[in-house]
Image (tube, rainbow, N blue to C red):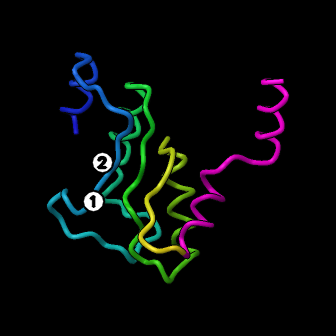
Amino acid sequence: MLTIVRAIDKQVINTKFFFLVATDLGFTRDTKQSFEKELQYARSTVAIAAKAAQVLSFDTPNVQFTNPQHLLEECTQVKQLGIKGKFAIHPNQIATINTVFGFSVEEVAYAAKVVN
């Protein structure tokens, strides 16, 4: 992960977004936790690197697609890290992800006011 930050610092990456794929990290995930602590460093690094590169960051999918409360808690926590979105593996996850990462009615109204 530090390599990503160094590469951005040298301005050698030309990309549109960063995303975390947790299966590539070489350890067993404890998906029963509402927030997988073993992913904290990786998520933080992706968020910081994306911010430094002025691109979006996306989180790895939540594999507990039958547990909407777990997804809601995880989305809320990764958003606080600076992650801007999350991949879904099941259509039932989309509404929760959009609720957490989408724009509020107030934000849309403000944007419309600024543009007009």
Front position in the image: 74 or 93? 93
Give the SS element for disc 1: helix
Reading the image, the residue beneath label 1 is 22
- Furthest residue toward left: 26
Kind of residue sitting beneath label 1: Ala
Q: Is residue 26 magenta?
A: no
Who's the residue at 19% across and 56% down the image?
A: 25
Q: Position of residue 61 (x, y in %)?
A: 39, 64
Q: Label 2 neighbourhood size at 10 Å, few (<14), some (14-19), many (20+)?
A: some
Percent across and percent down for residue 10 are 22, 16
The vertical placement of 69 against 44, above or below, is below
Query: Which label belongs to residue 71?
Result: none
Q: Residue at x 43, y 59 (%)?
A: 87
Name the residue type under label 2.
Answer: Ala
Quarter of the view holding residue 11:
top left
The secondary structure making up most of the magenta span is: helix
Range of residues picked out in magenta: 92-116
Which label lies toward us, 2 or 1? Answer: 1
Q: Secondary structure at mark 2?
A: helix
Compared across the picture, whether 46 is left or right of 69 comes to: left
Which x, y percent locates residue 89? Answer: 41, 70
- In the image, taking residue 42 as reference, residue 100 lies left or right, namely right
- Left or right: residue 31 versus residue 71 is left
Give the numbered dot on residue 42.
Answer: 2
Question: Residue 56: x percent and y percent?
Answer: 45, 38
Q: Is residue 99 magenta?
A: yes
From the viewer's side, name the closer residue of 28 and 17: 17
